[in-house]
Amino acid sequence: MDRLALLAANPQDTTREEIYLAVASLYRVQGNHLNDREKGLMRDILQRLTRDVEMAIRIALAERLAEDTSAPDDLILLLADDTIEVARPIILRNPLLTDEDMLRLIAESDIGHQEAVAARPHIGDTVTAALAKSEVESVLVTLVRNTTARISGSTYEVLVDKSRKFAGLQEPITHRPDLPPVLASKMCNWVSDALKIYIVHNYPIERTKLDTAMDSAEHAIRSTPPAPKPTPAESARKLVEKLFAAGQLKAGFLLRVLHQGQIDLFDLAFAKLLDLPLIEVRQDLYERGPKPVALACRAVGIDRCVFATVFKLSRQARLMKTVLTATDLQIVDGAFATYTKVAAIEELQTLAKKG
């Protein structure tokens, strides 16, 4: 163990990434057999290496451990405390995290971590009550859109009161089947006519308490969400250019905006990283099967372990099928194994010329 610590401080011919993965793998396999001193030493090694190891490597490790119930708690907590791109799969899917862990993340971590906690399946009353205290609209909206979250009546009162200030909170609250009818009635004092219609149709409230609304408004709240814009907003372009110029436009940014559902920004940032026209990148991502998607991921440094997430979320945003056959998976594996980053871009350019 002491030799591992010395090697971490002075890697010599071994990269820090290799040491990081080796220590993490050893910790995962042997964690239950280590004494407190050895565990502490491994945690110290991983913490010291974290800032020097590429985010894609840490994301790949988090994806591998996201559903691992045998990993040491300390290793899971270390990843949960990492940047949100690394922490997200752990927070969303690892069953080892307790309510106490969730409460600590809510109290001590940034907005991204709080949003991930709010999206975690089957969070309980204590956690949802803590999240409801947030003054960040995105955290509150994520919470009420989490249909598996258990929300108590007192927490609903907090959320309903906050919906006066946060208009984006109103629609998802009224669509929750467990919203107490008395609170739904209270919301009629400030929500739009369209939501008043939804409330009167779905909760036992006297119609005399509601205003008359047009039929078109009711249709609007039931309509399918709009598809991604053919031409992203100018603000999105400026953000991508700014991040690129500062050297901050990386794979982690792509994953963050994709998880947040900002599909136009995701496409635009992907095109910038690939140095390819937006229309061509969108064809690669959505019209030419899984291989171009795998090549694009390989070219920008997205790990194979994260590919399925990228493929699924990007296609869901465009209301496309996300199923990959066994043949598709073989093609994807081949693309990641065969092509270097440079070769992947060259192959994408070749595919574009073939149409």
Image: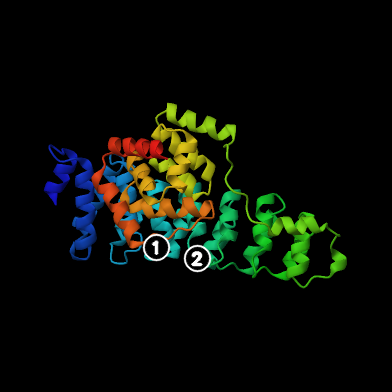
Residue 349 at what x, y percent from top left?
Answer: 37, 35
Q: Earlier in the sequence, mark 1 or mark 2?
A: 1
Q: Secondary structure at mark 1?
A: loop
Q: Is residue 265 visible?
A: yes
- Give the amino acid type for the residue marked by disc 1 in the picture: Leu
Would residue 11 be found to the left or right of residue 280 on screen? left
- Give the amino acid type for the residue marked by disc 2 in the picture: Ile
Q: Quadrant of the C terminus?
A: top left
For mark 1, does the 10 Å Cα neighbourhood hold few (<14), some (14 to 19), or many (20 or more) residues?
Answer: some
Q: Secondary structure at mark 2?
A: loop
> Circle 2 sits on which residue?
123
> Circle 1 sits on which residue?
97
Real-space CA distance between mark 1 and mark 2, rounded to the nearest whole angstrom:
11 Å
Occupied quadrant, residue 203:
bottom right
Say the numbered circle drawn on residue 343: none
Residue 131 vertical position relative to residue 242 in the rendered view, above or below: below
Residue 13 at what x, y percent from top left?
Answer: 12, 38
Q: Residue furthest bottom?
A: 204
Residue 262 vertical position relative to residue 149 in the rendered view, above or below: above
**Number of numbered discs overlaid on the protein picture:** 2
For mark 2, does the 10 Å Cα neighbourhood hold few (<14), some (14 to 19), or many (20 or more) residues?
Answer: many
Residue 12 vertical position relative to residue 109 in the rendered view, above or below: above
Q: Residue furthest front?
A: 354
Q: Is residue 135 visible?
A: no
Would residue 40 be found to the left or right of residue 280 on screen? left
Residue 120 at what x, y percent from top left?
Answer: 48, 61
Q: Residue furthest right?
A: 208
Q: In terms of depth relative to the viewer, which is nearer, 313 or 139?
A: 313
The residue sitting at 39% across, 47% down in the picture is 293
- Colour treatment of the image: rainbow
Q: In terms of depth relative to the viewer, which is nearer, 309 or 144?
A: 309
